[in-house]
Amino acid sequence: MAGMFSDGHALPCLAFALVRGGLAASPLPWVAISEAEPPQGAVRSVVRGGEHLTGACRHSNCGSVMYSYSAADVVSEYTQDGRWFDPDWEDICEMYHAHGRPVGAQSGLAFLDVGANIGTFAIPMSQCLRHASSGAAGSVIAVEASPRHVDMLKANVNVNDASNILLFPYAVGDHTDHHVTLAVHPENNCITAAIPVPSFWETAEKLSAEMTTLDEIYRAYPDVMRRVLAMKLDVEGYEGRVVKGAHALLKEAPPCYLKMEVQEDWLKLAGTPAVDVLNKLRSYGFVSAWPGSIRIMHINNS
């Protein structure tokens, strides 16, 4: 069954009407954030951009407060410069403004952010979904493996009152039976990789994260996962493993749009060459948004 919107058009990729339910107790809990202090040494900045899409203006003050790391990394440098790291969130936000809220849905649409880092995509998207909705606000499902990033993300959720973010502190892949080791890039703190990248794996600081799959999250929270209009997937070469562990989701209730990071060398290291990942996504109905691209894809509704 397709999702029907207030302007009368349908998106077959949305299956929100098939399941009803809430965020009941689950063996795969998300993090409820009421108070979260920034980690020691975190740098507080105001990031501006896209306020016409998010409504992130309080009186004469526009922008979002964001905490980031004092150590040099690309994401923190952008944040402390007052800019969002990835401006693609604005294009995705405009999709939500265009689609509105599904007719008959008790809640708004959802955005799935796999590899949420410190929240430079999740925070503006949470504001976008509150601003775009009429009635119940949409939700952001933010999944992040690094315990360090999770602490910073929790502080950013709290300071921006982003109560519509559901935070899942897990690594995601193609199985659920163990913890995974993450290596922190020594010169770029925002990169934590679960694959043995030769250039830094041996000397990198190691972290540990519990492993799950998108199918496990889907089974635990079907209502919100079936309302995902767009998904961002950026997990440092583990994208193919994530796709393998999302068979039920991508078969039964795929997002309409997918933004995916593609690092061919790292995908190959993970045992999932880029061409295989692309073919798997095509088998679920995804097509490139423009010829030759596998970074932005959408469901073929024809």
Image (cartoon, helix red, strand yellow):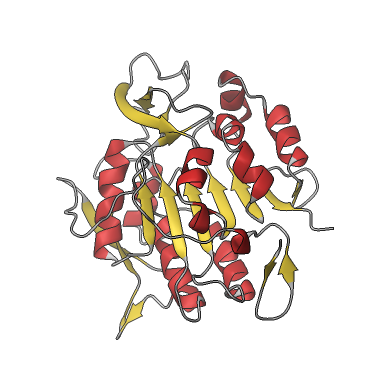
Q: Nearer the viewer, residue 59 or 107?
A: 107
At a point 44% along the width and 58% down the height, the residue shown is 140
> Picture quarter containing residue 184?
top left
At a point 70% along the width and 49% down the height, the residue shown is 297
Work out whether 99 lies above or below 235: below
In screen coordinates, is 11 left or right of 116? right
User: Residue 201: x, y in percent?
Assistant: 40, 18
At a point 76% along the width and 38% down the height, the residue shown is 283
User: Residue 282: x, y in percent?
Assistant: 76, 40
Work out whether 71 lies above or below 125: above
User: Residue 260: x, y in percent?
Assistant: 60, 44
Where's the N terminus, which quadrant? bottom right
Q: Nearer the viewer, residue 174 or 235?
A: 174
User: Residue 299: x, y in percent?
Assistant: 73, 53
Where's the C terminus, which quadrant? bottom right
Work out whether 267 lies above or below 113: above
> Picture quarter containing residue 192?
top left
In screen coordinates, is 129 left or right of 46? right
